[in-house]
Image (cartoon, grey):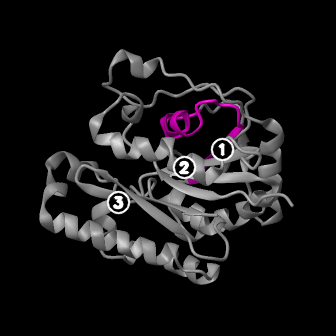
Amino acid sequence: MTRRAPVVSISHGGGPLPLLGDPAHAAITKSLKTRVPQILKLGTAEQPKAIVLVTAHWSTDKPTVSNGAKPELYYDFGGFPPEAYNLKYDAPGSPEIARLVQSVLKEAGVECSMDGTRGWDHGVFVPMTLIHPAATIPILQLSVLTSESPSAHFALGRALAPLRDQNIAIIGSGFASLHNMRAMFSGAIKTSAFKRLNEEWSAQIMDAVKTEDVEERGRKFEGWRGWNGAYDMHPRGGAEHFLPLVVCAGAGGEGKGEGYADEFVGLDMWSYYWE
């Protein structure tokens, strides 16, 4: 029997820092090297034959999948040491599987474009270098939507779910627990009030993730902007680091999701998965 591939929503860290030995990223880096490969069953006969990776760093009007055979890398960050711009990740793309992704989405009524020139941003190549340094599994990069519509992203995930039965894993790459640069740089995240709010916020996410019925899970995620702390963790117009999780929640299907936390800047940064 063909294995049903997992869905994983990861915290990908800040720019290239997980690959540069940044001490603040030690826990996230360790999990990307150990926990995620274990969930994906890398190095076994059951490892995915391909990965569809939904990245926070590519926003388009409608879902778009990369279909280049050998995507270049986008060093879409600034102010880092020279070695950050010499990083390499040589995994292949797959025009064939990109067509499959487009076909599966079309069958579900989701129109999907293809982009043969789009390179992989750091939401792809930084975590994947840690997750699968062998770089042998084809990756298809998928955009999030500029509309930030939670219902559209959940529907996108549900449309992607049949790919799992062909042993194609779904990875969401973002920072669901927190992506508020102003709060981070101002030091607001270090206050006890912010930490309590972040804990409450994460509890609301976990409640939705662990909701077994996919329809009910969808209703919860569709209302995420009403959760306490939503705009503190993801300011208005800046939901792109939360949306990959919404796609993953749709792709997760029936049954409870699980999660694990990594310490980062004094807070728990959560990643979630469905097996």
Badge 2 crowding class, 10 Å Cα cut-off, few under 14, some 14 to 19, many 20 or more, is: many
Position of the N terminus, as image quadrant, is bottom right
Q: Are marks 2 and 1 in contact (CB under 8 Å)?
A: no
Q: Residue at x 52, y 35 (%)?
A: 121
Secondary structure beneath label 1: loop
Q: Residue at x 42, y 43 (%)?
A: 30
The x, y position of residue 272, in whole percent, is: 50, 61
Sequence-wise first label, 1 or 3:
1
- Which amino acid, mark 1? Leu
The x, y position of residue 232, in whole percent, is: 27, 64
The x, y position of residue 106, in whole percent, is: 80, 59
Give the farthest residue toward the front: 44
For the residues marked 1 and 3, what is the alpha-carbon distance in whole angstroms? 32 Å
Badge 3 crowding class, 10 Å Cα cut-off, few under 14, some 14 to 19, many 20 or more, is: many
Q: Residue at x 35, y 61 (%)?
A: 236
Q: Give the range drawn in magenta.
A: 120-144
Q: Disc 2 designates what residue? A: 36
Indicate yes or no whether the magenta region holds residue 142.
Answer: yes
Q: Disc 3 designates what residue? A: 234
Q: Quadrant of residue 194?
A: bottom left
Q: Can you tell which mark lies on residue 42?
A: 1
Residue 172 sits above or below residue 233 on the image: above
For the residues marked 2 and 1, what is the alpha-carbon distance in whole angstroms? 9 Å
**Is residue 271 rendered to the left or right of residue 114?**
left
Task: Name the front one of labels 3 and 2.
Answer: 2
Residue 263 sits above or below residue 203 on the image: above
- Which amino acid, mark 3? His
